[in-house]
Amino acid sequence: MYVFRPMTTPRPSSSTVLLAAFRDFLRLGSASGVLLMAAGVLALILANSPLAATYARFVDLPVAVRVGSFALAKPLLLWINDGLMAVFFLLVGLELKREILEGELSDRQRAALPAFAAVGGMALPALIYAAIAWGDPVAMRGWAIPAATDIAFALGILSLLGDRVPIALKAFLVSLAIFDDVGAILIIALFYTAEISLGALAVAALCAAALWLINRQGTTEVTPYLLVGAVMWVAVLKSGIHATLVGVVVALFIPMRDPSDPESSPLRRLEHDLHTAVAFGILPLFAFANAGVSLTGIGLDALLHPVPLGVAAGLVLGKQLGVFGFAWLGVRTGLARLPEGVTWRSIYGVSLLSGVGFTMSLFIGSLAFGSLGAEAGFDERLGIIGGSLVAGLAGFLVLRRVLPRSGATAEVG
């Protein structure tokens, strides 16, 4: 909703606008996290109720798009995972570009701490998973599942602590999750790509060139970028590379500024327009479609299988050790510093909270094991849901203990 101000009212400064945008993002992320929890719980209930067959028919519903002799036919689950998640990655790309150009990541010192923490938060969970799954080539496909953080879910948990959470700690968690998402994007591109069709890839390359030309011409309307991006998505889908990555590529070409109006930002407008749809539509729908784990016949052997056990251990142990340990190492070496008002105890609480890998872990798990279906003999979602719940609860309890009460003096140490 636009509010018209009298001409005598001065325009807000760019720093004020950025701070307001960041607070809007936190509010959306927190509310989305609560909705994600509800969607995941509903999927679990349906998958273990008399409506289980109806739920299965819903996610397997055939959906086809035809233009002449060309057709794309997939079950609804894959349209959600391959199509709607490309929009999510478009939003991730927009946030990343904005943060690098104008936000928290534009300052090298402020970016150093979450960057160090993210490296550890991706490496340690993967190593712990690999140690547990070592010797099983099928199980080893899932080494990247515990490497990413679900920002919406984590912010949703953090929001339960209200104004006790300093803005700098929220910024650390958001920046950490952005770096995690970048790592996940690289992992998907490098390790979860099928056989490549050179013809389709050539079409995708032409689309990338078209995006560059549109940007060089100074086009600030986002529609041409999105239309070329849609063609690129189809080409990449047919090429064998995961099509969600197109979202990030398109985001990199969206202009940050309108040369004719320095106060106008096409990137921020598109980011604002996408936030609500992603937060309250795409991510909850993804969670609902992917979290429906049937617990029928689940015994101790299923929980202790190397895949769910490795995922849970990576999320609960690997994340806290990696994020906290590498953050400490960055500060200890002088390459990073703690933000003002943030303590090591609160960093440890966020390190635990970063083990909530729900959405991104489910997504990578679908890439790693989706082709196996019922033949897998295990369900990685048991480890994802269990590990995320344990990490989220532990992080909440630690932060609830170490963060000062409203109006109290911040804790020391």
Image (cartoon, rainbow, N blue to C red):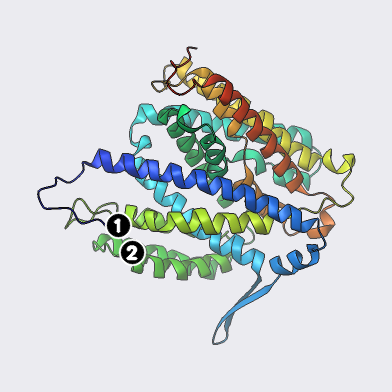
Q: Quadrant of the N terminus?
A: bottom left
The answer to whether 324 is drawn above or below residue 376 in the figure is: above
- Which residue is at the front of the view, 275 or 74? 275
Q: Earlier in the sequence, mark 1 or mark 2?
A: 2
Find numbered disc 2 in the image and state the secondary structure of the residue it sits on: loop
Relative to 296, is 163 above or below? above
Residue 244 visible in rendering: no
Q: Is residue 325 left or right of residue 299?
A: left
| Amino acid, disc 2 | Val
Q: Residue at x 49, y 21 (%)?
A: 405
Q: Position of residue 320 (x, y in %)?
A: 62, 27
- Residue underneath mark 1: 266
Identify the residue at image location x=69%, y=41%.
Answer: 143
What amino acid type is highlighted by mark number 1? Pro
Mark sitting on residue 222: 2
- Residue 388 vs 42, above or below: the answer is above
Mark 1 and mark 2 residues within 8 Å of each other at the beta carbon: yes
Judge the density around disc 2: few (<14), some (14-19), many (≥20) Cα neighbours within 10 Å. Answer: some
Q: Residue furthest front?
A: 407
298 on left or right of 231: right
Q: Nearer the viewer, residue 54 or 379?
A: 54
Q: Is residue 157 left or right of residue 378?
A: left
Whether residue 221 is visible here, answered yes or no, is yes
Front residue of 300/40: it is 40
Of all residues shown, which one is farthest toward the left?
Answer: 8
Q: Position of residue 236 (x, y in %)?
A: 53, 65
* 296 lies above or below 136: below
